[in-house]
Image (spheres, grey):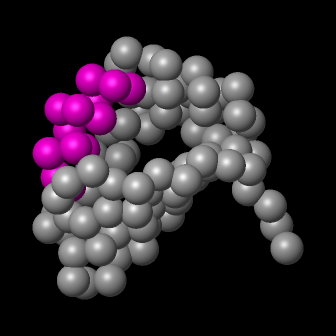
Amino acid sequence: MYGTVMIGRSSATLDDLRPLFDAWVDAIGREAGFIDERILADGGGRVVMCVRFRDEAAYRALADNPRQHEWWTSTMAPLLDGEPEWIDGHWHDL
């Protein structure tokens, strides 16, 4: 399994984000090999989002997908305070 972790700041609530992610899964994620996601919000604006895909090839294909770029720049990026930090890699169960 492969994926990414995004670390950023946002004033959006989980209630704001949930329908956006649901729409993303239906429009882009499911066909891109998306498996699941988790969001950690500290209540003070810090957000950590973990997203997993079936494999690295699926994740890289999504990263190169113009529809994904458009969704990110029009839907998610405006909800963040500045640029987030990204960590991409393989997920492992311990």
Question: In the depicted view, which residue is nearer to us: 36 or 90?
Answer: 90
Do we see residue 35 in this rendering?
no
Q: How many marks?
A: 0
Residue drawn at the location 20% of the way across and 38% of the way down: 75
Q: Which residues are magenta?
A: 68-80
In the rendering, at what x and y percent does residue 63 appear? Answer: 49, 27
Q: Of all residues shown, which one is farthest toward the right?
A: 94
In the image, residue 27 sits, relative to residue 53, either above or below, namely: above
In the image, residue 75 sits, relative to residue 43, either above or below, namely: above
Residue drawn at the location 54% of the way across and 32% of the way down: 30
Question: In the depicted view, which residue is nearer to us: 58 or 25?
Answer: 58
Quadrant containing the C terminus is bottom right
Is residue 69 a member of the stretch shown in magenta? yes
Q: Looking at the magenta stretch, what is its main secondary structure?
A: helix
Residue drawn at the location 35% of the way across and 19% of the way down: 67
In the image, residue 42 sits, relative to residue 83, either above or below, namely: below
In the rendering, at what x and y percent does residue 89 appear? Answer: 68, 49
In the rendering, at what x and y percent does residue 69 appear? Answer: 34, 25
Residue 31: name its quadrant: top right
